[in-house]
Amino acid sequence: MTEEQLIYDWNRQSAGADLTHSLEVLDVTMVEAPHSPAARQPALSERLRLLHQLDELGLDLVCLGDAGEGWAETLPLVSEVAESRLKVRSAVLCRNHAAELERVAEASEQLGQAIHVLLHCGYSPLQEWKGEAWRAARAERMQESVMFAVGLGLNVTLLCPDAPQAHPAWLVDTLGRALDSGARRLALVDTTGCATPEGVARLMAFVIELCRRKGMPQRIDWFGFNDRGLALANALTALESGASRVHASVLGLAERSGCVPLDLLLINLRLLGALDRPMEALASVCQRVAETYQVEVLSNYPVLGKDAFRTGTGVHAAAIIKAERKGFSWLADLIYSGVPAGQFGFEQLIEVGPMAGESNVLHWLARNALEATPERVQALLAAAKSADHVLSDQEIRAALGETASLQV
Amino acid sequence: MAYDWNLPDTALLQLNRHLQLQDETLRDGLQRPSAYDPPIQAKLEILHLMEALGIHGADVGLPGAGPRAAADVTAIVTEIVEQKLKIKPSCAGRTLKVDIQPIVDIAQKTGKLLEADLFIGSSPVRQYAEDWTLDRMLKVTEEAVVYAVEQGLEVMYVTEDTIRSHPETLRRLYTTAIECGAIRICLCDTVGHATPDGVRALVRFIREVVADTGKPVKLDWHGHRDRGLGLANTLAAVEVGVDRVHGTALGIGERVGNTPMEHLLINLKLLGVLQNDLSRLREYVGAVSRHCRVPLPFSWPGLGRDAFAATSAESAERLIELYELGERQLFEHTFSGVTPALVGREARFAVGPRSGPANVRGWQLQSQKSGEIEPVLAAARECGRVLEPNELEAL
């Protein structure tokens, strides 16, 4: 019996998803996580250690900081990538300032390694209230910056803020200028987290057509925030709609409600068959990020949270146990889980709580090498049914300990 | 104002009908391993907040789970009757008489027409593990639905793990349940496996199955968030025409939980599908957080502490002018895709190590303070994290 025989996958019955093109992931944890109000600022040594761990994930690029006021913090990380010969490539945020671009070009030359420039556009469609003259001046400056950077031999991606709120004419003008000036890639940014998947698909189609009309290769990045709770779905939609690179932060750490969570993006791409990278390091990297920025991995965080593979429900526990008895570990891992725990270094846990059945109790006793006498089963079930939460091992032992004949 | 690539959402605007919401907080929600089952008074408080938000139905428990569950369900249904609440109660149970009878008893005791949400595992993986044949499942379905209908219950027939079930199995199960009197069927992503494309494919197929029966049967969607796609999946189900969607406060539920009801409400309102008053949304989420002892994450969209905090210099710089000009609508719109006023909140400037002068200036304006800016920024850099309001005031 195989997994394919036992799972009819409706996800694969639609012609909608196309993730067969090559795709890249750009990690922005080190630039976005510090904006999370819950995060603290790590020391350079901690960020260096984190950089090495991120490298283990097989990411394509990592944004290491900015080339402005933060350059002193960015440069050691860029140097580390080159000197330690990490597999991941460096990217740096730049504004429309010649000095910043020159710094990056100089560092790139000295280190003998390309550094990708993520260039802030410098104006947004939400700033139209500032007037046409202001916008035109900003647009001209952006164009000059792109040309200057390209002249320095830099690989430029233009970050286009508030793209899901940009009028088509604004996009044609702004993105057109960037492409005409030599930008290699366009990054559409959902700065306020306002987009829906349908909106993303429409926007992507429009920008792809724009690239086609200009005779330019379609190299589009997506980066979005999570204000509506849709950042992950939007990122997947962008990839399905033709984006070839997504920016994401571990645990979605970023300002307000965060941004595309890198970990869940990788997990979903793996489950969709679009990525074939090992994921064993993912949990430890996420834990490292949580420690580095002193944030908590919430118990209900998909896959990585404490509750992700726990159940105290009788029906679920019974099915998992029956699956285990069939002799296929993958079966027990899949029967009540959309994400196979084993693929990501976890296991299914059966616990005992108010919704538990006899199966939960039998499983707990077996796991703790205790004979499942009728008295023990009855005592544990009674304790569970009268509890208002899933019992800890200590509470279960205490419940058994109340009766001398049941003591553990 | 801005151009909105999200709208018009053709699929949603074509829906010429009234979408309903089903709250699963008091049943599936309490199956979250870290959640506490709150006392009955707390459950009643949560129930009234569901009513205030205009939520149409609530699964109020699985009375077959034991005497405590049955007592709580009875008390909740009694409250609905006595307080003449509009919210429609339903109870969960397996497709077994032993689970249906307690629902019948509560209906008789309270005199309230109850919906029985009767579930059965339908996926091949479950069939294999349980050694179930399709004939056995059909027999169980028939017996359970007929019995429940005969006892005066409205039946919603629920197939667990529908998203991984074979189409012909689903056709036969649903057709049987509908022929036996089920008036509603529920497609479940019990294990959080679905993607939006999968949801669309499944719902479209099942709509054909229902149409073939010729009966006016309603369609529900119930999803989990194991892959982080619970909300997007539920919105996809709405887009392809389900009649009712399920959610729970704070997304609490089995494993990492269900579609968060508050995010569903916010998104449906932003999409123009619902017009519910969301002013008590914080109260609803707060009550569930407090009573079920589940923390509200700081970054939780729309409702978390940090959801409307501008900490970075870049954000504050693009916002401060609008704030100073008194352009509140544009200010909020530039701040977040969810306007804070929608959920009764205000956007705020915060000061942390990555902040700039505009953050301090914004905080000063909002809190009607004045003073030098650089010492505040220096303190934030020194502190290494976002300063608390009392720390800012002390500075």
Image: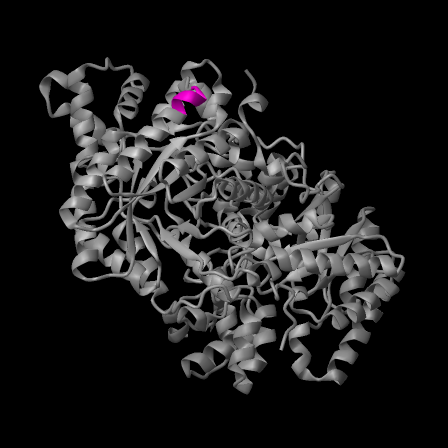
Viewer-nearest residue: B262 or B241:
B241
Left or right side of A276 for B148 = left
The residue stretch that appears in magenta? B133-137
Query: Based on the displayed image, in which of its 4 quarters is residue A31 positioned?
Result: bottom right
Picture residue at 56% right of the left edge, 76% below the top: B358
Is A131 one of the magenta-colored residues?
Answer: no
Left or right side of A271 for A125 = right
Query: Based on the displayed image, in which of its 4 quarters is residue A313 positioned?
Result: top left
Where residue B370 appears, as percent x and y from the top left, is 45, 84
Q: Decide: is A181 above or below A44.
A: below
* Structure colour scheme: one colour
Left or right side of B123 for A196 = right
Left or right side of A292 for B44 = left
Picture residue at 57% right of the left edge, 32% below the top: A9
The N terminus of chain A is located in which quarter?
A: top right
The C terminus of chain A is located in which quarter?
A: top left
Confirm whether residue A65 shows in the render.
no
Viewer-nearest residue: A41 or A195:
A195
Where residue B309 appears, as percent x and y from the top left, is 48, 67
Query: Based on the displayed image, in which of its 4 quarters is residue A355 positioned?
Result: top left
Picture residue at 74% right of the left edge, 48% below the top: A244
Q: Decide: is B266 above or below A231.
A: below
Confirm whether residue B188 shows in the render.
yes
Picture residue at 45% right of the left edge, 64% below the top: B274
